[in-house]
Image: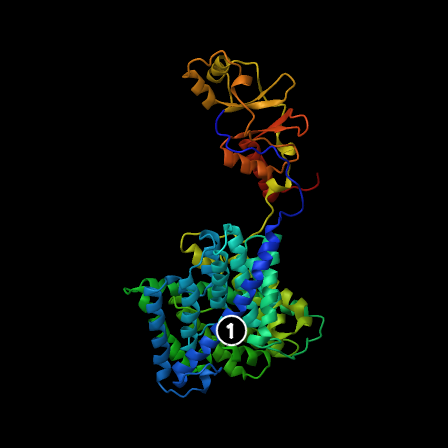
Amino acid sequence: MSGTPIRSGESHPLGDHSVDSRMPRLAVMATVVGAGGALGAWVLVKLIAVATNLFWFARLSADTVSITDASVGLMVIAIPVIGSLIIGLMARFGSDKIRGHGIPEAIETILYGESRLSLKVAILKPLSSAISIGSGGPFGAEGPIIMTGGAIGSLFAQCFHLSAAERKTLLVAGAAAGMTAIFGTPLAAILLAVEVLLFEWKPRSFVPVVVAAIISYSCRPYLLGAGPMFAMTAPLPGTSWDLFASAALGIVVGIEAMLLSTSLYRVEDLFHRLPLHWMWWPAIGAIAVGLGGLGDARVLGAGYANIDALLNGSLALKLVVSLLVIKALVWLIALGSGTSGGVLAPLLILGGAAGYLLGQFLPGEPSFWAMIGMAGIMSGAMRAPLTGALFAVELTGHFEAIPCTIAAAAGAYAVSVLFMRRSILTEKIARRGRHVLQEYTVDTLDLLQAGQIMTHAPETLPASMTTAQAVRFFAEEARHRSYPVVDADNRLVGIVSRADALRWQTTAGTQDVSLGETISDADLPVAFPETPAGLVADLIIETGIGRIPIVDQSSRKVVGLLSRQDLLKVRSASRMAEVGRSRFA
C-alpha cells in the first residue's frame, strides 16, 4: 500500500459554523491588539500634529493646528515638496511598503504574505504618513492607521505559534481598532473588516475583530475624545421621495467614484513613464499640491475641517465648487505619485461636496445631502456598501438617516460593480499581477455530504486475490488507478493502487500472497456517508489518493467511492445553477 500518510476514519461533527477553542483564545489576544490599535491611532494623530507644527509654524508642538492658519507665502509650494522628498528617501532606503494608501498593502499581505508585517513597516508607515499629511499632503489618516493597526496585530500574532489564518484575524482586528479610534465608528470598522479585509465570514475571525473594535472604542475617550467626530444637526428632509433621491444621488457619486478611480491610475501610469527613479515621484507630485494650496489652502492636509464644514452647511457654494475641483486634482496627482497617505478623508470631501452641490436642487438642507454623498462615494470607491452606509451615520451621529445612506450606498455600489472591474483598492493589487475576488460564497462541497455525491456500489477487489492476480488485473483490466480491497463481508481491508502492482511485479517472493495479507488498513484514508464533501476533497489533496472509499461507520462495509471526478461534477452543477436559465418546470 502506498500514498496513505494519514488516517481519516474518525467522524467529523457537523454544525452551522466551523469553530473551536482557538476562537476564545484569539478573542483574548484581540483585547491587547485593540488597545494597541487605539494607542497607534493616538500616536499617529500626535505625529501629524507635530509634523504640521514643524513644517508650517516652525515650532515643536503636538497641539492640533490648521494649515489654513499659516502664513508662509510662496513656501506653500516648497513645503509639500520637502515633505515628499523625505518620504521618497524613507521608501527608497527604508521600506517601499510605506508607499500608497495602506489598505491595498494590507489586503496583499493578508492574501499573499501570510499576514506577516514587519516592525519596520509598523514604525515607518505612521511616520511617513505624518510627514506626508503634516507637510500638506491631501490625505487622511485612516489608510495609514489601518496599515499601522494591522502591523501591530500582525507583530503581536507573530509572537505566538499561530496559523496564517489566525494571524490574519489579529491583523484585521488591529486595523479595525485603528479605524475605530480615529473616527469613533466601531460598527463601520467591523463591517470594513468583513467587506474588504477578512475575505471570509467566520466566527473565528468575526468575534476577535469585534472585541478589538470594542476595546479601541472604550479607549478612545481617554486618547482622542468621545462622541461623533462630525456631529451634525441637519434634519431629514421629511418627504416621501427621500429614499429615491438618496438612491439617485448614490448613482451620481458612484459615477464620480468611478471617474476618480480611473483617473488615479491614469495619473499613476504617467508617473511610471517618467525617466526618473520612483523615489523622486512624490516630490514631483507635491509641486501640484503646493500650487493647489496656493490657490486654496483648504485642500492641504487631511481636510477634516472641510468635512465638518460640509456637514454643517458653513461653506459658500463657490468655495464648495473650488474645493471639489482643486482637491480632486491635487489628491489624484499626489496619490498617483506613490507617496504615503489615505484615501478615505479625500473621498468623503469629494463625495460630500458633490452631495452638497446637488442638495441645492433637492428638498432639505444641502448638508444632509453632503452626508448622503459621503456614504455613496465610500461605497462606490471601496466596494463596501454596508461600511459606507454605517460609516456616514456613525461619523455624524445621525442614525435616523440609515435608510437614506443605505439607498445611496446601494446605488453607488451598483454603478461601481457594473462599470468597473476593480475598486480603487484592488486595482493597485491587480497591477502587481494579483487577482482579487471580493465575492463571498459558500463552497458547494461544504453543503453536501459524501453520501450524496459518491459513486454507489463501486468496483472492489477481493482480499483473497493474490498479488500476482492483482498485477495482471492492473495490466489488462483496470480502469482506475486504485481500488478498495474488501473481505467476504464487503468490509474494507485496504486500498491497492497501480503503484503497488508495479512494485510487486519487481519484488521476488510476493506473487502468491493474498492482498489481505499484504496490505493493511492502518493509516487508511476513508470517509463516511455523513462526512462533508469538502473534507473528502481535503483528504484527496493530503494523501494524493484520488479515490476515497466511503464506508458505513459502524460495520466498515464499503458503500461507495468518492473520486476527483465526482467532486468536479459538483462544481459543474453549481456553475449550471448560476448560468442555466429556465421557466416553469
Q: Residue at x 62, y 57 (%)?
A: 207
Lateral position of residue 61 relative to residue 195, left or right? left
Whether residue 288 appears in this view of the structure is yes
Most extreme residue toward the front is 160
Q: Residue at x 39, y 81 (%)?
A: 55
Amino acid marked by disc 1: Trp
Q: Which residue is mark 1?
A: 42
Q: Dot 1, crowdedness within 10 Å: few (<14), some or many (≥20)?
A: many
Label 1's element?
helix
Q: Quadrant of residue 236?
A: bottom right
Q: Quadrant of residue 570?
A: top right
Where residue 109 sits in the image (x, y, percent)?
Answer: 46, 56
Where residue 432 sits in the image (x, y, percent)?
Answer: 40, 55
Which image quarter holds the C terminus?
Answer: top right
Most extreme residue toward the left is 275
Where residue 398 sits in the image (x, y, percent)?
Answer: 66, 74
Query: Vertical placement of 507 versus 364: above or below?
Result: above
Lateral position of residue 497 relative to residue 202, left or right? left
Where residue 30 sits in the image (x, y, percent)?
Answer: 57, 60
Lateral position of residue 560 relative to residue 511, left or right? right
Query: Vertical placement of 367 versus 163: above or below?
Result: below
Q: How many marks on residues?
A: 1
Query: Vertical placement of 11 versus 388: above or below?
Result: above
Whether residue 253 appears in this view of the structure is no
Color scheme of the displayed model: rainbow
Residue 236 or 538: which is nearer the viewer?
538
Residue 91 or 21: which is nearer the viewer?
21
